[in-house]
């Protein structure tokens, strides 16, 4: 057993010596298409794919957003809503539900008692129907979008929408805690019986806001 570390050292030394003489790897070619979505169709395609994933999609302008958020919270029966630290105050001005700030000390049980959460997003990808969160100030910590059973996510269109994943990557900071959401939380067993809400909200409502 005592010779094992020495054997590993010899093997690694041989590997390093072998690769030291290897030519530098060429830069990979990236000649593929970044998107298959016709220009101008990104927002409509995003809405279609979100609906395919059983998200509920709404569209409005900036002026109509507070009333729409209030209506969705009322229809869901929510009495409390988790609020990220920099969520625009105007978004909740028409709602009288109790606002629960995103706190580091909040326990899972406390978050589970919150009915809904309202957030912005970092980006949305039309071809995959995906919402990307990066824990930005209008999104809060990842857990507030995973524990409450109802998530209302606001996407500013068209500026926050891209066609394909390759277009999204340069706009995303890989050092941030990223959450990629394609529809409500769901899983299936071996018989393909779908169960929602296992590891996230059962209901995802996405509001596409035209500025």
Image (spheres, rainbow, N blue to C red):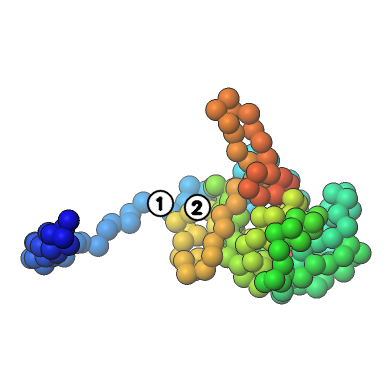
In the drawing, what numbered circle is on residue 164?
Answer: 2
Question: Which of pointers 1 and 2 lies earlier in the amino acid sequence?
Answer: 1
Q: Residue furthest top?
A: 191
In the rendered view, does 102 fall on the left or right side of 69? Answer: left
Element type at marker 2? loop
When the figure is inspected, residue 19 is found, relative to residue 105, above or below; the finding is above
- At 66% from the left and 68% from the top, the residue drawn is 140
| Rendered location of residue 172, percent (x, y) | 50, 65
- The answer to whether the residue labelled 1 contacts the one labelled 2, judged by CB atoms less than 8 Å apart, is yes
**What residue is disc 1 on?**
33
Give the farthest residue toward the right: 96
Say left or right for 21 vs 24.
left
Nearest the camera: 33 or 205?
Answer: 205
Picture coordinates of residue 16, whole percent (x, y): 13, 65
* Neighbour tally class for label 2: few under 14, some 14-19, many 20 plus, Cα within 10 Å: many
In this rendering, does residue 77 appear at all? yes
The kind of secondary structure element at disc 1 is loop
Callout 1: few (<14), some (14-19), or many (20+) C-alpha neighbours within 10 Å? few
In the image, is 191 to the left or to the right of 209?
left
Instruction: State the residue at coordinates (13%, 63%).
Output: 6
> Which residue is at a point 87% across and 65% down the rendered structure image?
98
- 180 to 92, vertically: above or below: above
The alpha-carbon separation of the residues under discs 1 and 2 comes to 9 Å
- If the image is split into quadrants, where does the N terminus sit? bottom left
State how many labels appear.
2
Q: Nearer the viewer, residue 106 or 68?
A: 106
């Amino acid at each position: 057993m005592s010779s094992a570390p020495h054997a590993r050292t010899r093997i690694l030394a041989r590997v390093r010596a072998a690769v030291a003489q290897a030519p530098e790897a060429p830069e990979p070619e990236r000649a593929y298409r970044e998107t298959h979505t016709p220009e101008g169709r990104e927002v409509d395609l995003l809405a279609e794919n979100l609906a395919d994933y059983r998200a509920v999609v709404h569209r409005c302008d900036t002026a109509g957003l507070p009333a729409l958020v209030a209506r969705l919270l009322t229809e869901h029966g929510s009495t409390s809503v988790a609020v990220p630290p920099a969520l625009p105050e105007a978004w909740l001005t028409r709602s009288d539900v109790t606002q629960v700030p995103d706190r580091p000390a909040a326990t899972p049980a406390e978050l589970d008692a919150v009915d809904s959460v309202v957030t912005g997003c970092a980006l949305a990808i039309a071809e995959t129907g995906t919402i990307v969160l990066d824990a930005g100030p209008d999104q809060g910590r990842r857990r507030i979008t995973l524990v409450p059973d109802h998530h209302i996510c606001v996407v500013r269109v068209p500026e926050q929408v891209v066609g394909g994943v390759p277009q999204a990557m340069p706009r995303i900071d890989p050092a941030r805690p990223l959450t990629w959401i394609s529809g409500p939380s769901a899983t299936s067993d071996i018989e393909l019986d779908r169960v929602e809400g296992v590891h996230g909200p059962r209901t995802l409502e996405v509001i596409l806001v035209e500025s």
